[in-house]
Image (cartoon, rainbow, N blue to C red):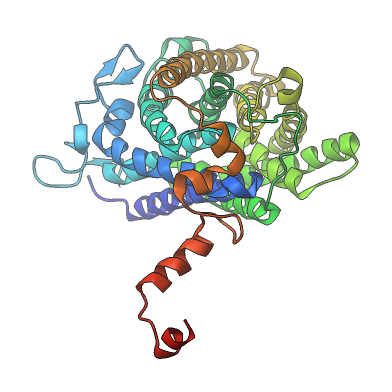
C-alpha cells in the first residue's frame, strides 16, 4: 500500500503534541502541591513516561491492538511482543494501515497510555513511595489500561464489534472511557487504599505556584489538539470539527467553572480557570467528533459547572483526592460520555435519535467503572501488603523531595539542588592561593 505522507505527517505531529501533555501535567500537578513535594509530584509523571515508554513496545501494543483477542478483554501480549511484525513485513517494507505506517500509530498510542497513568498520580500527592508508584504504573497500565484500550478501540467488548453494539455503536472518540473514566476511578480507589495526607481537612494545603498551574493547563490545552483532532487519523474535516469542538467546549467550561466559583466562594480564581480548562478538555474528549460546536458549548458549560461542584465532594465524603482527579477526570469523563447520548448530531436524543445511543453510552461507562475499580483495588491492596504505599510520617512532614530525591525545588528548603549542586562544584574545584591564605 502506498504511503499517505499527509496523514503520516499529521499523526507524527499529533503524537508529539500528546507526548507534550505529560510534562504539561507535571507542571499542572506540581504547581498545585506544596513546595516541599513539587519535584516528587513532577517525577511521578516523568516516571510514568519512563516505565510505560518501555512496556508499550514490549507488550502494550500487542495487548491493545493485536488480532488474537482473549474474551474481548485483551489481546495476546506475545503476538507482537517487541513490535515483532508490527513494523516491517516479510518483504522488509513498513507495515501499512490505510496509508499510515503502523509504527506511527504505535507512537501515537503510547502517548495515550502514558498520560492516562500519569493522571492517577494527582490523587496520591505528597504521601506515597516513589518506588511503589513506579511498580504500580507498570502493573496498572498492563492490567487496566491495555485491556480497556482493546475493549473500546481494539475490537473488544465495548467497541462497535462487541455485544452492546446491537443497541447502538458505542462512541469514545478519543478516550472518555479509556483515559478519563479509567484513570478517575483508579484515582478514587487508590485515594481510599492509601489514605489521607497528614492533617487533611485540618491544615491548609494550598497550591504553591499558581503560574505553574496556569502553564500546565496551557500546555495541556495545546497538546489536547493532538489528542482529539489527531484521533480523526487524517488531516481532514473531522479533525477540524474535533479541533473546533475542543476549543469551544473548553472555553465554555472555563465560564461554567468560574460562575460556580463566583457564586459559591465569591471569587473567580486562576486555579478555577485552569481547572475549568481541564474539565472542558476531559468532557469533549469522547465527543469531539460527534457534536456540533453549539452542542460543545452546552457540554462545556455543564461539565465546567458540575466539575466545579464535584471537587468539594472529597471533603464531604472524607477521601483525599489531593489534586481533584476524581472531581475533574471521573466526573468530566462521565459527563462527556453520557451526554453524547443527548447531543450527538447522529443518534443523540435531542436530534431525534431515541434512547439507544444514550443507553449504550451509560452501559460502557458503567462497565469501565467496574472494570477499572476492581483491577485497581486488587493492584492497590497487593502493593500495600508488599511494598507499602506510604512514606514515613517524618518524610511526609519534611517533604518527599529532600528525603526521597535528595533535591528541593527552591533554595532554603534543604537537601536540594539549590544547595547540593554548588557544594558538588565547590568540592571538585581547585583551591586558589587566595583561598588557602584566607583559610
Residue 282 drawn at (x, y percent): 61, 36
Residue 31 appearing in the image: yes
Q: In this view of the protein, which residue sits in the foreground, 199 or 65? A: 199
- Horizontal and vertical percent position of residue 396: 58, 37
The image shows residue 34, relative to residue 153, as above or below, that is below
**Residue depicted at 20% across the width and 32% down the height:** 81
Viewer-proximal residue, 63 or 134? 134
Instruction: Residue 317 in the image: state x and y as whole percent.
Output: 72, 18
Judge left or right: residue 23 versus residue 273: left
Question: Residue 363: x percent and y percent?
Answer: 55, 12
Whether residue 240 is visible here, answered yes or no, is no
Q: Residue at x 42, y 19 (%)?
A: 379
Please state, as top left, top right, bottom left or bottom right, where the N terminus lies in the image.
Answer: top left
Left or right, 402 with reference to 321: left
Residue 321 occupies which quadrant of the picture?
A: top right
Q: Along the horizontal axis of the image, is 141 left or right of 347?
A: left
Residue at x 52% of width, y 35% of height: 121
Compared to 280, does 36 lie above or below? below
What residue is at 30 percent from the left and 33 percent from the top?
Answer: 61
Q: Quadrant of residue 58?
A: top left
**Relative height, residue 362 to residue 437 (above, below):** above
Amino acid at each position: 500500500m502506498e504511503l499517505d505522507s499527509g496523514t503520516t505527517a499529521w499523526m507524527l505531529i499529533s503524537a508529539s503534541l500528546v507526548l507534550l501533555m505529560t510534562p504539561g501535567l507535571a507542571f499542572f500537578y506540581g504547581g498545585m502541591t506544596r513546595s516541599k513535594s513539587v519535584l516528587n509530584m513532577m517525577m511521578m509523571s516523568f516516571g510514568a513516561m519512563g516505565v510505560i515508554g518501555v512496556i508499550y513496545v514490549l507488550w502494550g501494543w500487542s495487548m491493545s491492538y493485536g488480532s488474537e483477542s482473549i474474551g474481548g478483554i485483551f489481546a495476546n501480549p506475545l503476538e507482537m511482543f517487541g513490535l515483532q511484525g508490527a513494523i516491517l513485513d516479510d518483504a522488509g517494507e513498513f507495515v501499512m494501515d490505510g496509508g499510515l505506517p503502523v509504527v506511527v500509530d504505535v507512537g501515537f498510542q503510547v502517548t495515550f497510555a502514558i498520560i492516562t497513568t500519569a493522571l492517577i498520580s494527582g490523587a496520591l500527592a505528597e504521601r506515597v513511595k516513589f518506588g511503589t508508584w513506579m511498580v504500580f504504573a507498570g502493573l496498572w497500565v498492563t492490567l487496566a489500561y491495555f485491556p480497556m484500550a482493546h475493549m473500546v478501540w481494539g475490537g473488544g467488548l465495548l467497541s462497535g464489534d462487541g455485544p452492546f453494539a446491537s443497541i447502538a455503536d458505542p462512541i469514545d472518540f478519543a478516550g472518555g472511557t479509556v483515559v478519563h473514566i479509567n484513570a478517575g476511578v483508579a484515582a478514587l480507589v487508590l485515594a481510599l487504599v492509601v489514605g489521607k495526607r497528614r492533617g487533611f481537612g485540618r491544615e491548609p494545603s494550598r497550591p504553591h505556584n499558581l503560574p505553574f498551574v496556569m502553564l500546565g493547563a496551557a500546555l495541556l490545552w495545546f497538546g489536547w489538539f493532538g489528542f482529539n483532532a489527531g484521533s480523526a487519523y487524517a488531516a481532514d474535516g473531522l479533525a477540524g470539527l474535533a479541533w473546533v469542538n475542543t476549543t469551544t467546549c473548553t472555553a465554555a467550561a472555563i465560564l461554567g467553572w468560574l460562575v460556580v466559583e463566583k457564586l459559591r466562594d465569591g471569587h473567580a480564581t486562576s486555579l478555577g480557570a485552569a481547572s475549568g480548562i481541564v474539565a472542558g478538555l476531559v468532557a469533549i474528549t469522547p465527543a469531539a467528533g460527534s457534536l456540533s460546536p453549539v452542542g460543545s458549548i452546552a457540554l462545556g458549560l455543564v461539565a465546567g459547572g458540575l466539575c466545579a461542584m464535584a471537587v468539594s465532594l472529597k471533603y464531604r465524603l472524607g477521601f483525599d483526592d489531593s489534586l481533584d482527579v476524581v472531581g475533574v477526570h471521573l466526573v468530566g469523563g462521565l459527563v462527556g460520555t453520557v451526554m453524547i447520548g443527548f447531543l450527538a448530531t447522529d443518534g443523540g436524543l435531542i436530534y431525534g435519535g431515541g434512547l439507544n445511543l444514550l443507553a449504550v453510552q451509560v452501559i460502557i461507562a458503567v462497565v469501565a467503572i467496574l472494570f477499572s475499580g476492581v483491577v485497581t483495588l486488587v493492584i492497590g491492596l497487593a502493593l500495600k501488603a508488599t511494598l507499602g504505599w506510604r512514606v514515613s510520617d517524618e518524610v511526609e512532614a519534611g517533604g518527599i523531595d529532600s528525603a526521597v530525591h535528595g533535591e528541593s525545588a527552591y533554595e532554603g528548603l534543604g537537601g536540594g539542588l539549590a544547595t547540593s549542586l554548588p557544594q558538588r562544584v565547590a568540592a571538585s574545584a581547585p583551591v586558589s592561593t587566595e583561598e588557602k591564605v584566607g583559610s
